[in-house]
Image: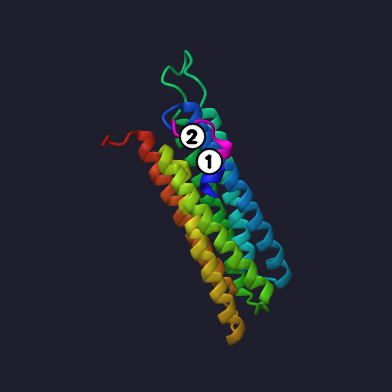
């Protein structure tokens, strides 16, 4: 699938040093990220709402942020591709780092909001009735996110894009979060223990951690890393 997308939608895909080709890589990766994340988001939100799981809903909202992150990366590639002008004789390439920092701030805010919801569920616990459909949706979500993480990492490494690598890292954290939620919901259902709120809190912490890594890499590049 990866090679198919590259060959079908990126002209002169072997010429990765050409700015226009690099922009095409960024566009394809970003649009793919938006589509996959929205599909996962819709599935988790719908099923999470039906079974009343704050953890599953939180994971779905997390994917909304991921879709937004991919949209931000798309915009950053478009702006970074602008030609140098009188005010910016070295071009607009650092715009990508600024957008990455903006994405990390979104993650921090989202983590705080989800933590508040999770604490509220912990204070007012409810046992979630897990269905086979919910488990299937979570497994499919994990499969899609594993593929997307691999795809974004490959594209990010190929064109040396920090924002694409950041999105790939975020996808991997999603996989672990979704796996933990799935196992937790099953355990809570069998043990009849209200674990949903605690799982939501763990997801919030993972989102915050991913935001920190994105912020750290982006600010380091913006300030100027020591060259290899």
Residue 29 as seen in the image, left or right of residue 47: left
Task: Look at the image and give the residue range highlighted in magenta.
Answer: 6-15
Q: Residue at x 52, y 48 (%)?
A: 2
Is there any visible trace of residue 197 in the rendered image? yes
Pinpoint residue 142: horizontal percent, then vertical percent.
Answer: 55, 63
Residue 50 as seen in the image, left or right of residue 143: right
Residue tagged 2? 13
Residue 193 as seen in the image, left or right of residue 156: right
In the image, is residue 156 above or below residue 89?
below
Do the CB atoms of the residues marked 2 and 1 lie less than 8 Å apart? yes
Magenta-colored stretch includes residue 80: no
Magenta-colored stretch includes residue 13: yes
Image quarter in which the C terminus is found: top left
Pinpoint residue 213: horizontal percent, then vertical percent.
Answer: 41, 50
Q: Earlier in the sequence, mark 2 or mark 1?
A: 1
Is there any visible trace of residue 73 in the rendered image? no
- Nearer-the-camera pick, 41 or 154: 154
């Amino acid at each position: 699938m990866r090679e198919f997308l590259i060959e079908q939608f990126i002209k002169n895909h072997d010429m990765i040093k050409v700015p226009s080709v690099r922009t095409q890589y960024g566009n394809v990766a970003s649009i793919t990220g938006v589509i996959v994340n929205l599909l996962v988001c819709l599935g988790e939100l719908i099923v999470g709402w039906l079974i009343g799981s704050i953890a599953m809903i939180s994971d779905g909202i997390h994917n909304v942020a991921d879709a937004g992150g991919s949209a931000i990366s798309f915009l950053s590639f478009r702006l970074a591709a602008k030609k140098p002008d009188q005010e910016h004789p070295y071009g607009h390439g650092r715009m990508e780092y600024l957008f990455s920092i903006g994405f990390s701030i979104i993650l921090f805010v989202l983590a705080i909001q989800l933590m508040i919801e999770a604490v509220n569920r912990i204070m007012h616990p409810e046992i979630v009735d897990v269905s086979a459909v919910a488990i299937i949706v979570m497994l499919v979500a994990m499969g899609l996110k594993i593929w997307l993480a691999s795809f974004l990492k490959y594209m990010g490494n190929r064109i040396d894009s920090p924002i694409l690598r950041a999105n790939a890292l975020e996808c991997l954290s999603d996989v672990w979060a979704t796996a933990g939620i799935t196992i937790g919901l099953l355990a809570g259902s069998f043990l009849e223990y209200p674990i949903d709120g605690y799982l939501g809190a763990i997801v919030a912490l993972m989102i915050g951690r991913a935001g920190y890594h994105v912020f750290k890499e982006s600010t380091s590049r913006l300030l100027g890393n020591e060259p290899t």
